Image (tube, rainbow, N blue to C red):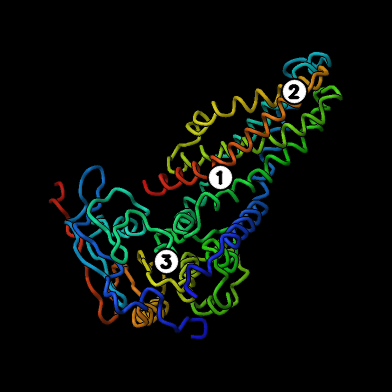
Amino acid sequence: MATCNTQPHPVARQPETRVPILEFKNFICERDGQALFRPLNFSLSPGDLVQISGPNGAGKTTFLRAVCGLFDDWSGELFWQGQATRTPGYEMCSNLLYLGHQPGVKKSLTAAENLHWFFGSHGRAFPGQVSEALAQVGLSGYEDVFCHQMSAGQMRRVALARLYVSSAAIWILDEPFTAIDRAGVRNLETLIQRHTSKGGLVILTTHQPLALDGVRLVELTPQTEMPE
Amino acid sequence: MTQAESLSLRRALLAGLRRELVIAFRHKGDLANPLIFFLMVVVFIPLGISEEPAMLARIAPGVLWVIALLATLLSLDGLFRSDFDDGSLEQLVLSPQPLGYLVLTKVLVHWLVTGVPLTLLAPVLGVMLQLPVEGYLVLVLSLLVGTGSLSLIGSIGAALTVGLRKGGLLLSLVIMPFYVPVLIFGSGAVKNAIQGFAVGAELAVLVAMLLGWLMLAPFAIAGALKISVRA
């Protein structure tokens, strides 16, 4: 892949410290004073691929949002490279790529404009060529097509094109396979595998079976029994 | 070179400015909305109140200012709404660049596409309301500066209410008190000009308010948006 950065990630380039990138201690998300799941204790190092699993409503999305600093109502401790953090700071933000349920693709902009803005809003020039990035997600020739003319899957693909060119070490993907066809899913799985093998870190949720090696499963178990 | 060094705030601001301008000009209906409202009300006023020139000339400064204010208010509700709905706002919050500066580009574009056109339209509507000739220059100057404050103040309210399903009413209630001084000094300046008094003080206060809000608003908007996104 021409556009992909082949150098190891800056975060991964610190083998002497052995400090995990992210560490969770007694991490709980709450809604209306109720803990959503049992306290989580685990740490993540470069090259980890973590699947957050649990039934609907277990708090998977909330957990991912809390890690990114998009959800405030959590207790416990979160360490970023050994330092306790509440909301991600500059360094974490510039190494983080979050893809939520709403992918942040503006319908009145074209695919190319959306991608340019995404990297621009971080203060980056677009890494590589937009046409190549779109070709990676099977949208070659769609650079100047308005996103409101695209299908749901194609709009997701525009958002996914960020992954192919991003140099962020940490990917937090909330249901990345939604509305993506089978070939697209295979393509994305290859990309995720390559990212972790280069020392990247991927946290994702999905209800699809993953054809990936070395997936660490983190199960969110409800704190209390569901009300009848 | 590490990644952090290659990031540039200037690039982020330019990207934001470019995007907002492109979006604004692709939604031409939203662009025309406040202007049509402004025009409509000014047409209705002589019909509804009095067509007598002396009467109209007396109320014109206040009426023009009040309608400009309401037209701005009308355009504010959607300021962050679509970004909130499609997830762009989350991505903006996650940007390593300071959110306050990033959203300032949004406010600037809001002013460019509502405040500036309203200011340019106001003299034309002034003619329809028999505004005395001494008032035009001050009307344009006061609106140009005043609408800047209105956009900044309104953005704080829009940011606070974007997460609420029916934030429109609350938005008006939240920002109304802060609009009052702008209105008083704005219409006061035009009245003074018509009566032949000095207007320097009023205009200076309007500029001071603009600068004050320009310093405060980025922090307030960023804080409010973070609350809305994290709720």
| Residue B138, placed above or below residue A87 | above
Residue type pointed to by label 3: Leu
Residue underneath mark 3: A97
Chain assignment, label 2? B
Marker disc for residue A120: none
**Residue A18 pos. (x, y %):** 26, 75
Residue underneath mark 1: B79
Residue underneath mark 2: B61
Quadrant of residue A47 within the rendered picture = bottom left
**For mark 3, does the 10 Å Cα neighbourhood hold few (<14), some (14 to 19), or many (20 or more) residues?**
many
Residue type pointed to by label 1: Leu
**Residue B106 pos. (x, y %):** 59, 49
Q: Secondary structure at mark 3?
A: strand
Residue type pointed to by label 2: Pro
**Residue A30 pos. (x, y %):** 24, 48
Instruction: Calculate the distance from the C-alpha at mark 2 to the C-alpha at mark 3.
Output: 52 Å
Q: Is residue B163 left or right of residue B38?
A: left
Instruction: Calculate the distance from the C-alpha at mark 2 to the C-alpha at mark 1.
Output: 28 Å
Q: Nearer the viewer, residue B41 or B198?
A: B198
**Residue B170 pos. (x, y %):** 47, 32
Chain assignment, label 3? A
Quadrant of residue A190 within the rendered picture = bottom left
**For mark 2, does the 10 Å Cα neighbourhood hold few (<14), some (14 to 19), or many (20 or more) residues?**
many
Q: Nearer the viewer, residue B92 or B37?
A: B92
Chain assignment, label 1? B
